[in-house]
Image (cartoon, rainbow, N blue to C red):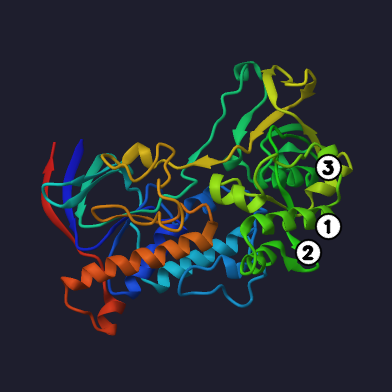
Amino acid sequence: MMASRTMWVNGPIIVGAGPAGIAAAACLHTRGVPSVVLDRDDCLASLWQRRTYDRLRLHLPKHFCQLPGMPFPDHYPEYPTKHQFVAYLESYAAAFHVRPRFRQSVVSARFDHAAGLWRVTASDASDDAEVVTEYIGRWLVVATGENAERVIPDLDGADSFKGPVSHVSEYKSGEPYKGKRVLVVGCGNSGMEVCLDLCDHGARPSMVVRDGVHVLPREMLGVATFSVAVFLLRFLPLRLVDRLLVLLAGLFLGGDLARLGLRRPSHGGPLELKNSKGRTPVLDIGALDKIRAGEIKIVPGVRRMEAGGAELVDGRFVAADAVILATGYHSNVPQWLKGSDFFSGEGYPKVDFPEGWKGESGLYSVGFTRRGLAGLSLDAVRVASDIATEYHSTSPSPSPSMIAQQQPQLVPCSQAET
């Protein structure tokens, strides 16, 4: 049995209850604008809660990662753990009265030009009967982010491999891999950290490095590398800062990275590639020492998988008992946002940062800047300010007590069962 209903939303419809979605809702709340937040999972920040490994910490100092209006607790370390970050997000949502509607999987969102409204269709299959709800409102905020879906590469001969193949989103700890040979495909921050964790649990990882990668120290003389970069960007152009970062990385990490199999990209510095391609530089937290010690082996690309391992592009064979795909994530916006050319086929706004937060007909985006939590926070503030201006031009200005108690109104327009 399937039930369907239509609900009017007297504020923005926000798709996604990760950091981007709750930051947008919080910024709207402080401006007296109610909103409805929809998410397909059953918890806040499901990527952080369900699809990250146990040892994960924020890669940047906490003051670069706080959301608008609420700093991290003073007792948190400089690099909070994932559990601390999730607790912070839950406290943040509670402080700003953000209460997402969970298990609402958005299957389509389309602007109705005749009505001048957004129609967002969401399916809830958590009960025995599927319930399809159409949410109707004046504004749509896309906040599903850059990491909505896993990237699964098509490895030639994958069916021939006899061991388990999993995505890094399923990885929690290296404990189950103790004593095993593990092929980690991908050399970003996740790939490097998973290899380090595997070593710590007695596994023998080999890491596939196909392309060039920028590796930077997480800190230099006790100062976060990102803090150094932000300071330098106040006075110098980005390309010059990139050159300085590469020079400093050589001084602090050593000049033998290419010999180890970690060659730098031939074009583009670490910040330039992060901003233009979303390719985050690796911040070393100990993996390089394991690579130099031979505990993590660097191998080139995979030509094809075989029963007991992989044939590499240079003709060598690497034995493996398991494969972990540290191949990242991608946006899923093109799967459900219909009739809009604001987003590209890859699921990013076509207009580059810092102008990619606003589309036409009440369409907004939060969290697609390729600049992490600081970028999504900037988006959230801009989006909330813009919507609030329009919202209050047609609504009476609320008092502070009204803002504290403001809740979105979901008004049933019609209901039918089939």
Q: Position of residue 321 (x, y in %)?
A: 73, 27
User: Of the residues under marks 3 and 2, which one precedes in the sequence?
Assistant: 2
Where's the C terminus, which quadrant? top left
Image vertical order of residue 286 relative to residue 174, above or below: below
Q: Position of residue 19 (x, y in %)?
A: 46, 59
Amino acid type of the residue that numbered disc 3 sits on in the rendered structure: Ile
Amino acid type of the residue that numbered disc 2 sits on in the rendered structure: Met
Element assignment for label 1: helix
* Residue linked to disc 3: 291
Are the two marked residues, 2 and 1, in contact with CB atoms closer than 8 angstroms?
A: yes
Badge 2 local density, few (<14 within 10 Å), some, or many (20+)?
Answer: some
* Residue linked to disc 1: 252
Q: Is residue 376 left or right of residue 175?
A: left
User: Of the residues under marks 1 and 3, which one precedes in the sequence?
Assistant: 1
Q: Position of residue 203 (x, y in %)?
A: 79, 38
* Residue linked to disc 2: 220
User: Of the residues under marks 2 and 1, which one precedes in the sequence?
Assistant: 2
Image vertical order of residue 132 relative to residue 141, above or below: above
Badge 1 local density, few (<14 within 10 Å), some, or many (20+)?
Answer: some
**Nearer the camera: disc 1 or disc 3:** 1
Residue 402 visible in rendering: yes
